[in-house]
Amino acid sequence: MMGASLSQTGHEHEGARIGFGHSLGWSRVFSGARARILTWYVLLLAFSTVVSVLVIRQALLERVNQRVERSLTQEVEEFRQLLGGNNPATGQPFGKDVAAIFDVFLSRNIPDDDEFLLTLVDGHLYESSPRALPQPLQPGSSLINRWAQLKQPQKGEEVTSVGTIQYLAEPVRIQYLAEPIRLGGQVQGVFVVAHTTAGEREEVNEAVFVVMQVTLAVFLAASVLAWVVAGRVLAPLRLLTETARAIHDSDLTRRIPVRGSDEIAELSATFNEMLDRLAAVFASQRDFINEVGHELRTPITIIRGHLELLSDDPEEHRETLDLVSDELDRMNRFVEDILLLAKAERPDFLLLETVDLAALTEELYVKTKALAHREWRLDARGRGRVVADRQRLTQAVINLAQNATQHTQEGDVIALGSAIRKGQVCLWVRDTGEGIAPDDQTRIFERFARLASGRRRSEGAGLGLSIVRAIAEAHQGRVQLHSRPGAGSTFTVMFAVEPADGGASS
């Protein structure tokens, strides 16, 4: 029973975990970038659709109003032409017979749909065309009574809720143009052209309804397509996420395929470039750790071996202590060089100040002459003041001079100098030693690099030239090397007179 209970509990937990996973999956679907993109797309599309439908409806109604206004104006103009003519029945002017004018005009003109021609005489409706009138235009209505009192032409629109036109349930909208008729200086009657626009407005509403139906169908289809397209567009981002999850420090070989030239492709290419840099950094870190371990292991092994074999002989004690002290000094120099290279990447590595180049060159010459018995020379002293870190430049030149002593013999020339050329500060150290093979001229600036051959007697760990390059690059410069085997070498530290970003001053 207990086993069954445990099994049942395990299945329940497994089911709960699966259910939670499905719940989390659906939650991510509806809260992810794809859903947000679709939501904003739908909102913008809905907003633009509503605005478009409203604008279309308003534009159609405006066109209806303009057409009706043109029709009203045309009828009044035709009536005015008749007013200035003769009675076709008698061939004589109409005179003050306004009824005859109305009869002739109504007999000759057929109104458009929803258009009504009204004539008023002595304050009452005289005749109309057509005879069937909507309730707001019936004799005795407020509109008829108001028009009958007009003394000046009037144009306007009347909205009335009294009755409807045919099957239309909305209020009657009547656009009209009323023209009082003056004969003999007195108003003898009023001619009115009225047009009910409810029919046209209903047609506009029907057309807008059809537009809304079509737009809704297009809206739904566009939303589905947008969901699909958003998934395809975001596919590289999902691949990016999967690749990032699969990457660890022991496997940096995976890359994202780059397709096209859009922002997603640029992001993929940038991510791949970052992986390349990370792979190079990790490889360099592994090599660095291996080299550091090797360099530290050797003196530790030497010290341990001599201490384990140490006897009671005082002379042997003294020799062992000297050897241990020498190895510890070498380890200390090595650790200091490592720390210096690590600090070279920090923004406060340099303490910039204004330095007199000629005075600095003189100081460097005096200091380097004490390194070894060589024929020391001073080639040139640059004239001018530069922005640089005096101590770091001294360290770089001393390292170059020390390196030169290890590849020369007594009697060989080691010279140093300085100059300012085309806005560039140049500090060089040259020697007439054994020179450097072309294959080694780039490699020697790497950490722990050693020449394949030569008479090198350096007690260091191959970090001197790496430190020189780090100091030059910190000054936004570089180290230039000219060398031929058997013809000596010239190392030149080059950097701008003033750093591009101004640097930090001490």
Image (cartoon, helix red, strand yellow):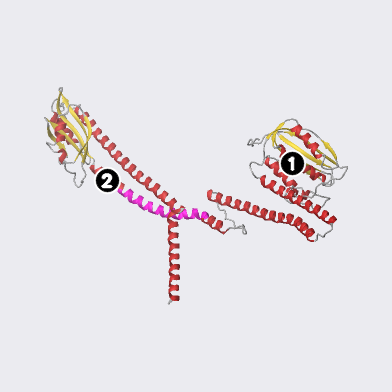
Looking at the figure, which quarter contains the N terminus?
Answer: bottom left
Q: Give yes or no for residue 420 being in the magenta stretch.
A: no
Q: Residue at x 15, y 34 (%)?
A: 144
Residue beneath the point at 53% across and 50% down: 264
The image position of residue 412, as x and y in percent, is 86, 42
Which quadrant of the structure image shows residue 77? top left
Q: Which residue is mark 1?
A: 395
Give the image location of residue 96, x and y in percent: 13, 25
- Taking the spot 79% from the left edge, 45% from the top edge, the residue there is 403
Residue count near mark 2 (Cα–Cα under 10 Å), binned few <14, some 14–19, many ≥20: some
Q: Position of residue 147 (x, y in %)?
A: 16, 32
In this image, 154 relative to 482: left or right? left
Spatial separation of the CA atoms under disc 2 and disc 1: 92 Å
Q: Secondary structure at mark 1?
A: helix
Q: From the image, give the main secondary structure of the stretch colored magenta.
A: helix
Q: Which residues are magenta?
A: 209-237
Question: In the image as oriented, which residue stretches furthest toward the top?
Answer: 185
State the residue position of label 2. 203
Q: Residue furthest bottom?
A: 1
Residue 9 picture location, percent across and down: 43, 70
Q: Is residue 236 left or right of residue 360?
A: left
Between discs 2 and 1, the one toward the N terminus: 2
Seen in the picture, residue 167 relative to 293 is either above or below; the reply is above
Quick check: can you spot residue 68?
Answer: yes
Q: Would residue 88 be seen by someone viewing this image from the given angle?
A: no
Residue type at mark 2: give it.
Glu
Looking at the rendering, in which quadrant would you find the C terminus? Answer: top right
Residue type highlighted by circle 1: Gln
